[in-house]
Amino acid sequence: MVAAVTSVVLGVSPASASAGWTVTPGGAATGTAGETVLTVRPVSGGDDMIMTCASSVAQINAFSSTDNHVADITDIAFNQCLLGGLISFEVDAHTPWPLHAMSYSAPVVSGEIQGISATIIGAGCLAEVAGTVNGSYHNTNDTLTVANDFTLTVTNVDPVDNCLGLINTGDAAAFTGVYAVDPGQDIVPA
């Protein structure tokens, strides 16, 4: 009752208070996604560049905490990636990527994947992408969904392998996918 009154008076939900989060069972988990998409939106306007990967696998370490840091993506692979369905490319992820729970509306935890850093590598292309993405974790069906909201930024493009000028420093980027997490985790406010 006190928590409910406090949340009304302070205008915060219990999940956004400093009590932390309980994650069960915690520990090592694997997130497996089918098609994942990286989209680059030119800051100068023009058409989006859509890069599609047939699948993605993330290694996750989940844990309870007294703050909102509830897991780390310790490794992530993107498989069979194509630009425009034709040009093969790789994504070299620089992990760990911390996962932070921000709010809770049963059974969904909304949050962020912070500290994202990755290199896009292809024929004549070498570009760095960094930032934070928004997402959600669904406790009932054990899925981590990454929002397609252009919160990433292209931070560097190699001057020689310059992606034919199609990707440029300062362009916005989005990464989206739905990862089935096994074993499933239950993430709730402490």
Image (spheres, rainbow, N blue to C red):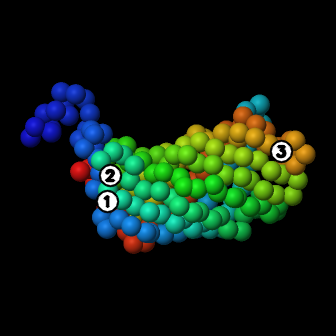
- Observer-side mark, 1 or 2, equals 2
The quadrant in which residue 5 appears is top left
Q: Name the residue under label 2.
A: 65
Q: Mark 3 points at which residue?
A: 158
Task: Mark yes or no: residue 42 visible.
Answer: no
The quadrant in which residue 28 appears is bottom left
Q: How crowded is mark 1: few (under 14 residues within 10 Å), some or many (20 or more)?
A: some
Q: Name the residue under label 1.
A: 23
Q: Where 171 sits versus 93, above or below?
A: above
Q: Is residue 36 rendered to the left or right of residue 64?
A: right
The quadrant in which residue 79 appears is bottom right
Label 1 and label 3: CA atoms lie apart by: 41 Å
Q: What residue type is labelled 1?
A: Val
Q: Earlier in the sequence, mark 1 or mark 3?
A: 1
Residues under numbered marks 1 and 2 in contact, where contact means CB atoms less than 8 Å apart: yes
Q: Residue furthest top?
A: 9
- Indicate which disc residue 85 carries: none
Q: What residue type is labelled 2?
A: Ser
User: Who's the residue at 28% across and 40% down the image?
Assistant: 18
User: Who's the residue at 51% across and 59% down the image?
Assistant: 73
Query: Residue 163, percent across and down?
Result: 84, 48
Q: Residue furthest right?
A: 160
Please tell me whether mark 3 sits on a helix, a strand or a loop.
strand
Identify the image quadrant of the N terminus.
top left
Residue closest to the eye, 14 or 82: 14
Q: Which amino acid does label 3 sit on?
A: Asp
Q: How crowded is mark 2: few (under 14 residues within 10 Å), some or many (20 or more)?
A: some
User: Who's the residue at 79% across and 39% down the image?
Assistant: 168
Please tell me whether mark 2 sits on a helix, a strand or a loop.
loop
